[in-house]
Every structure is written in structure tokens, then in C-alpha cells.
Amino acid sequence: MTTPVGRQVRVQGMVQGVGYRPFLYALAQRHGLTGEARNTAQGVVARVFGPARDVDAFVAALRVEAPPLARVSCVQARPIPAEEHAHFRILPSDAQGAPAVAVTPDAAICDACRRELLDPQDRRYRYPLLNCTQCGPRYSILLTVPYDRPNITMRAFPMCGACRAEYEDPTDRRHHAQPTCCPACGPRVRLLGGEGEPLDGDPVRGAARLLREGRILAVKGLGGFHLACDATRPPVVARLRARKHREDKPLAVMVPDADAAAALVHLPDYGRALLTGPQAPILVAPERAASPVAEEVAPGTDTLGVMVAYTPLHVLLFEELGDVPLVMTSGNLSEEPICIRNREALERLSGVADAFLVHDRPIHLRVDDSVLLATDPGPTLLRRARGYVPAGLEAGLDADGILGFGPLLKNTLALGRGTTVFPGQHVGDLDNVRALKMFDEVRAHLAEVLGVAPTLAACDLHPDYPTTRMAAQSGLPVVRVQHHHAHLAALLAETGDYASALGIAFDGAGYGPDGTVWGGEALVFDALGYERVCHLEHVALPGGDRAAREPWRMALAYLVREGLDWTRWVAHPRADSVARLLAGPLPQVQTSSMGRLFDAVAALCGLCDENTFEAKAPMRLEAAATDAPDAYPFALDGPVVRTGGVIRGVAEDLARGAPVGAVAGRFHNTLADLVVDIARRVRAERGLARVLLSGGCFVNRRLLAATHARLREAGFRVAAHTLLPPGDGAVSVGQVVHAAARRSRERGPG
Ligand SMILES: [Zn+2]
Ligand SMILES: [Zn+2]
């Protein structure tokens, strides 16, 4: 008989509202320990008693065996005198009030709920809205804090006796599961026709039948509506595209499970865990040759975005449909925000959807699906939303009360609390009234649930952005941040190392303080400031914004700049007049944008004359590229990267009939070489050996991999984004980081 020992442990992090106390209870039972546990403002505190070996095992498991949604940041244990307890108990929460707010993201259905859903003996059998402490809606149904039943949209549904008993039982896996419900007390699913008229019969079976017949359905999900249809039938997908006014931007597909996903795309090592984990994002990965998905789903690309059924309603749909992949795209028109309310969906999506699969659990806040790109060694975020928001980024500097308004395109906003920066969900392009309204909703909601009143605004340098205007109208002091500096400052915060570094920011456009459009930039920088050490040689941006939509204009601009015969390459009816403009006396807006260089080369290669969606031309060029042994010539001429050799080389190659794939491969090699050359020069001149890669161009798998590999071979330390998107979704965080650094400097030490 061993002498019992005692231990008091405190567990901190995201451990409230995620089933941590039932986990503690089960763990104590398993190790035969007695004692007690309770929620406090400082985290979960437990006192356990038993043989030393079992107590040690208990403590060791607190982090490694924590429930999936919990994020344990700290476990502290100290010995206390042994006490006599009959068993292990969960005590009521400490009266000291609300714990430090930990609002968790929405989570995909967990394994336990999936089993119940499909178990004919279970009282929640085939109930499409079941959830527990480990899964279901969170952020998207939260009205205010604390995270409690009266403060979520489920307050409209009083719990039945059975649900209440589970909710109050500390040993039950639904203990304090705020949105818990069942067929007796919870919301219901209904199937409505195109005019909103109720359709008879089982709604899920009815919906599955319509999908099999080739109809388009609006399906209410966690953070908004999807438009769904059979992804294997070309005419059906084409009809969805026509009705949604979405010409050729890739659509995502949903499949029942990870095996079905692996049958469509080549999953990376981490792919299965990611797709079936609580985040359950869309993962964009190389498509298999044998994939039955219609070409119309992602035309002109060699990749496909896949996700796995992540709500019980999706699971039930696939129980009827089997392995048929479904297109599941945001329930909106074109680029507007996703619909969330039933009536809103019926109005905005009438004429798009043939029927509506809805439920009456209200969604409070729009949250799109997150999108990640399969890169090595880990994934790259393209769109950060469901499953990730509102998790914060620990920035290591005082960002409290700083609101970053973000960029114009792919907008997110970000708010600091303490030393953590909380990026809001993807809002999208702020070029329509609905998007601006969503921006305001997210802005108000983030401040509400974080309990932070903004005291300082950070925004872009561009004088005409709506975000710049909103920042000025906020009544707060405003810090203006250059777009590419913001990109790199966000990445600096991700690395946690604030020492000066070389930053490479390659993207489409950002306002430059010299009045040109930046986008092919090498900055030596830290959180406080930057020096522009290198940039692409200027070229005219003929037609301004139109140049970004019509890549032939960029091909023309480059050819005219180099004095090459453009008539051979550009056949557009307007080419003549644009060429005259380029050669004429009127000043043209100049750009150093890498995105526009991609556009020009893609247009020369005949791959894309119109960017019907952002970055279409660069995506086409990436998809076309094959491995090439060499690269095109460029020159570092002081701070300017001379690109004439690249354009001439591409034109000569194409003129002598070189395959487009080889040209595209060489072009990618050229950019990787360029980054290494810039990095070598900066290392020689300034001793900096760390290189940070940001900007939308680095969602190009080929460019990212080649640049990364060659920099490492040359002895550099390289960092790319892992927690934020490399594109403009990171900008708001960088704005907050820069403003925080400035404020700290102004306040001085202490
Ligand atoms: Zn669950
Ligand atoms: Zn119930």
C-alpha cells in the first residue's frame, strides 16, 4: 500500500466550454484518484489525491490527452498535503465571476456525435442539429459574452428535461454544452421549394433526391448557406455557374470522408487529420487524373478544393448520396457575402437554387469556409474563417485596443487585446454595400466578444480605400501603414522574432508613398519601419484597374517598354489604341507589381486574356509550368530589378516554338533566383541572413517551394506564413503590429 500524495494543478489556455472538466473527471476515474476540480478566473484548478505514480500520470495527461477543442497553454502543479476524499467531484464555477473570455471557433461534428447520429438506438438518431462540448456552432451563434445559453441564438429553444440533465451532469460529455439540443426540444430542418413553399416528406431524403436529379440546392450550414449540386455532372455545374454569375473561378467540393477526399486529390501527410479535425477546412490539393469531378468545377487548374462533411446535416445527406461529391460553394451571388438568414436566402438565392434545405437555428454572424493550400511542410492559409476565428495570434507586444482596418481586397480586420491580435473572419472585397455591412458587423462583434473598446486605429496609406475613410471617421487616432510593410510585419509577429530582416513582398498591388503601385518589393524592415532596398523596374499600368483585369494590357505595356513588336503577341481589338497611349506623351501610372508581371507572361503565353477572378492568370501560369533547368536573365541595378531580359527571353522562346510549360517553368525559376540574389546582396551589405516571404504571389506552390529551397541552400533562414494567409488577409494584423510598435516607442520604456 503506497502512501497517498496530493497535488494542486492549474490548467490555463482555451479550457472552458470545451469539455475540459468532464475530461478531468474521466481521467481521475481512470487513475483511481479522488479530489475536486472547478473553473476559476485563472483557468481550471484541480486538487487530486492518490498514489504518487497515478497522480503523476494524471498530471502528465492534462496536456497531451486534452479534448480536441481545448488548447492548453500552461499546466502548473505543486504538492499539497494529502486529504481524505470519497471520490472525485466537479465543483460549481468559482463565484469570482466570468473566466477570462475564451470564445472558441465553430467546430466540425465530432466522432461521438457522429456515432449517435447514425445509431438507431440513440435518442438523437438522425437529428441533424446535434452537438456537444467538442463540436458544433460557437462563434457564429454567439450574441455576446459570456458564452452561455442566454447569450447564443439557441436561447430561443428551452432545453427539455433530458437535455437539461445532461447539461448539468459534470460527468456527461454535454456538460455545459451551450448549444445542446435534441429532436424533442431543438430546432428543426425543413425542405422548401424554389418559392419557399414547404415540401412534404423527410427533408434530408427529399434534398438528396433533388441533388441526384441534378437540381441546385441552397443548404444552411454552420456559418452561412451553401449552394450545392452534383459535382460529377458538367451541365449541372455549368447551370450553377450561370445562375450564380461565377464564370470560371474554382468551386469547392464536399465529400463524406477522408477516403473519398483521397480518391479525388493527392492529400499531403497532414491532409486527413486536417480535413477531419475540428477546423475541417477546404484543402486545395493536386487533383487525381481519375477524379470523377467535372472539369467545369475547377477549369484550367490542376488542383481541386475538397472538404469533408462537417455538420450532422451534411453527414446525413451523404448517408443518402454515398460517395457522390457535391459542389459546395458559398451561398451568394458573385463575390457578395454569404447568406445566413432563411428569408434572406430565399430572396437573394431565388432563381439560383431550385430548393432550400434550411433549419431554424439562427446564425448570428457570417463565417465562410476556411481555405488552405496543400504546401510543404504544412498547409498555407488562403482564407481564414470558420474553425480558425476567433482564435488569436500571440504577438508578444502590447496591442491592446488597436483596431486594424485591413485592405480593400480579401479584407479582414483585426483587434488587439493585451498582447494577442485577433483577426476577424474573411470579409472579402469591400466593393459592394453588403460587404461593407458585413465589415461593420464583424467589427462590432469582435469588440463585443473580446470585451475591447478600440482606442487606436491602423489603416492603409491609400487615401481612397473605404477602410481609410472608416478609420478617419472612427474618431480614433489613426496610424497609416504601407501595404507591403503590413504584410511583412504580420509575418514578423507570426515568427515571434522582431529582429530586422529582409522581407520579400510579391503581390498584385499596394499603395506606394511615391504615388506608384507597389507589388514586387524587397524591404529591410522591422515592426517599426522599413527601407525599400529593391523593387521591380517600373512599367505602365495602362487603364489603371482595368490592367489588373485584362492581362493583355500588361503584356502590351512590357512589350512597348522594351521596344518589341507587340503586334505578334497581342491581338486584342483595343490593343492599337492602348499601344498609342503607351507611346504617347500622357503620363501613365507606373507599377512595380509582381502580380502584373505574372499577368504579362501569362498573356504572352496565350494562357489568359481576362482575369475573371483575382490571380487567374498567375494560376494558369503555375498550372502550365513544367520543370525547367534554367532561368531568364535579370539584373540588379541599384534598387531596381531590370526585367527587360525576362520579357525578351519569354518572347524569344515563344517565337522559336518553345513549349509554354517550359517557358512558365523558366519564369518561376527566374523569380526564385531573383529572391536569392537580392538576399545575397542584403546579407553582404548588412549582415542580415533571415528572409521573410509574404504577399499573394506566395500562394503559388511552385514559387514558394523553389524560393524556399534555394534560399535554404544558400544558407538563409526562411519564414513564410503558417498562421495567416500570405495574401491580403494578413494585412490587418500587420497594421496592428506596426501601430503597437509605434505606440510602445512613443510611450517609452516603462
Ligand atoms: Zn460532438
Ligand atoms: Zn432536448
Image (cartoon, helix red, strand yellow):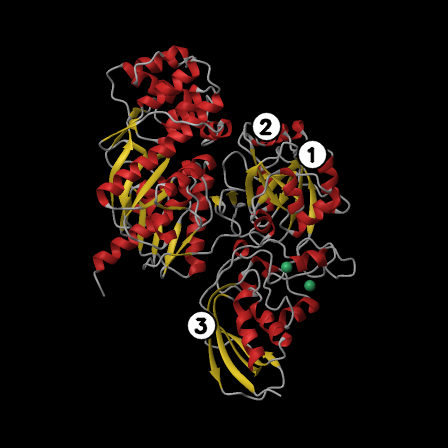
Where residue 434 appears, as percent x and y from the top left, is 47, 40
Q: Nearer the viewer, mark 3 or mark 2?
A: 3
Q: Which mark is residue 42?
A: 3
Q: Is residue 147 left or right of residue 22?
A: left
Lower position in the chain sequence, tag 3 or tag 2: 3
Marks 3 and 2, how far apart at CA: 54 Å
Where residue 102 appears, as percent x and y from the top left, is 48, 63
Q: Is residue 263 left or right of residue 453?
A: right
Q: Which mark is residue 380?
A: none
Lower position in the chain sequence, tag 1 or tag 2: 1
> In the structure shown, which secondary structural element does the residue marked by tag 2 occupy?
helix
Q: Which residue is mark 2?
A: 242
Where residue 19 appears, as percent x and y from the top left, is 58, 66
Kindly identify the amino acid type of the residue bearing the numbered disc 3.
Gln
Q: Is residue 424 above or below residue 352?
A: below
> In the structure shown, which secondary structural element does the residue marked by tag 1 occupy?
loop
Residue drawn 37% across the image and 27% down it: 597
Residue drawn 59% across the image and 37% down it: 349
The answer to whether the beta carbon of the residue marked 2 is less than 8 Å from any atom of ligand 1 is no
Q: Which residue is mark 1?
A: 215
Image quarter where the C terminus lies is: bottom left
Image quarter for ligand 1 equals bottom right
